[in-house]
Image (spheres, grey):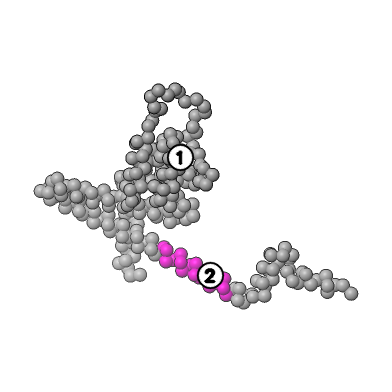
């Protein structure tokens, strides 16, 4: 990789980390309508019982989301942890919905929040890559906000060229940061694939050179007798 490309990636990563705290509403970076749908559903959920019904009798619904048989409690907790890191207010709304209607909460987590659940799985399987993805989402949020603001100003105040130019420069900077992050993530993927390939080659070479030992070890594992065939032959050899 040439020096200019390495510099671009490094600058992108450093600048991204510096603007994390300034990025408004990172959840807005999700390209699909999942978050919008979730929030609309939450707003439409009634907070009180319908008129004519008496007070609710029975134990209060626990604040901690209750998982179904197929949706583990640990997975639900990871989803909410990710939501907390992306947008605390969004996570609060999800928890409110969970208390009011756990069934609807589960449906949203399953069907309308693919990015959220995907991030939850990524956090559990690859924390380092998850952190990089989190930064990328926050930069994306900044890109989407600036692009939307530029379109609004161009529509409502087309003569305000100074503001349009300023926002355009900011957007260009965020796009450079995003590209640096994307290139860095791609290089990380390539490095990990190369490491896996190296490990696979070493494993194949070991099995090739230690062919008989590998067979004996697997035989012992399957039969439950240490030494495999050799252990099976030992008594016969010892007998007169």
Disc assigned to residue 103: 1
Q: Position of residue 87 (x, y in %)?
A: 37, 43
Secondary structure, magenta segment, majority class: helix
Disc assigned to residue 10: none
In the figure, is residue 204 to the left or right of 123? Answer: right
Q: Secondary structure at mark 2?
A: helix
Q: Going by the picture, which residue comes out furthest to the right?
A: 240
Q: Identify the image quadrant of residue 181.
A: bottom left
Q: Position of residue 209 (x, y in %)?
A: 62, 77
Q: Going by the picture, which residue comes out furthest to the bottom?
A: 209
Question: Distance of mark 2 from mark 1, alpha carbons?
Answer: 44 Å
**Which residues, given as a range, are shown in magenta?**
188-205
Residue, x 36% and y 39% (percent of image)?
41
Quarter of the figure that contains the N terminus:
bottom left
Residue, x 41% and y 63% (percent of image)?
188
In the figure, is residue 163 to the left or right of 197? Answer: left
In the figure, is residue 66 to the left or right of 25? Answer: right
Residue, x 74% and y 65% (percent of image)?
225
User: Going from the N terminus, do you reach mark 2 or mark 1 first?
Assistant: 1
In this rendering, the label closer to the viewer, 2 or 1: 1
Residue designated by label 2: 200
Mark 2 in CB contact with mark 1 (< 8 angstroms)? no
Residue, x 50% and y 70% (percent of image)?
198
């Amino acid at each position: 990789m040439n020096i200019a490309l390495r510099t671009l990636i490094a600058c992108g990563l450093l600048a991204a980390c510096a603007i994390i705290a300034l990025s408004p509403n990172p959840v807005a970076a999700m390209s699909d309508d999942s978050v919008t749908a979730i929030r609309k559903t939450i707003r439409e959920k009634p907070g009180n019982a319908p008129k004519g019904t008496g007070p609710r009798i029975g134990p209060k619904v626990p604040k901690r989301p209750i998982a179904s048989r197929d949706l583990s409690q640990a997975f639900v907790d990871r989803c909410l942890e990710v939501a907390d890191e992306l947008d605390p207010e969004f996570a609060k709304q999800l928890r409110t919905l969970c208390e009011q209607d756990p069934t609807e909460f589960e449906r949203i987590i399953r069907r309308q929040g693919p990015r959220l659940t995907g991030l939850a799985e990524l956090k559990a399987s690859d924390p380092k890559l998850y952190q990089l993805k989190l930064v990328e989402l926050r930069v994306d949020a900044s890109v989407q906000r600036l692009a939307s603001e530029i379109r609004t100003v161009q529509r409502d105040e087309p003569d305000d060229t100074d503001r349009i130019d300023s926002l355009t420069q900011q957007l260009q900077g965020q796009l450079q940061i995003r590209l640096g992050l994307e290139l860095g993530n791609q290089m990380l993927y390539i490095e990990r694939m190369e490491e896996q390939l190296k490990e696979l080659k070493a494993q194949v070479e070991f099995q090739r050179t230690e062919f008989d030992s590998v067979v004996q070890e697997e035989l012992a594992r399957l039969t439950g007798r240490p030494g495999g065939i050799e252990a099976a032959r030992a008594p016969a050899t010892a007998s007169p």
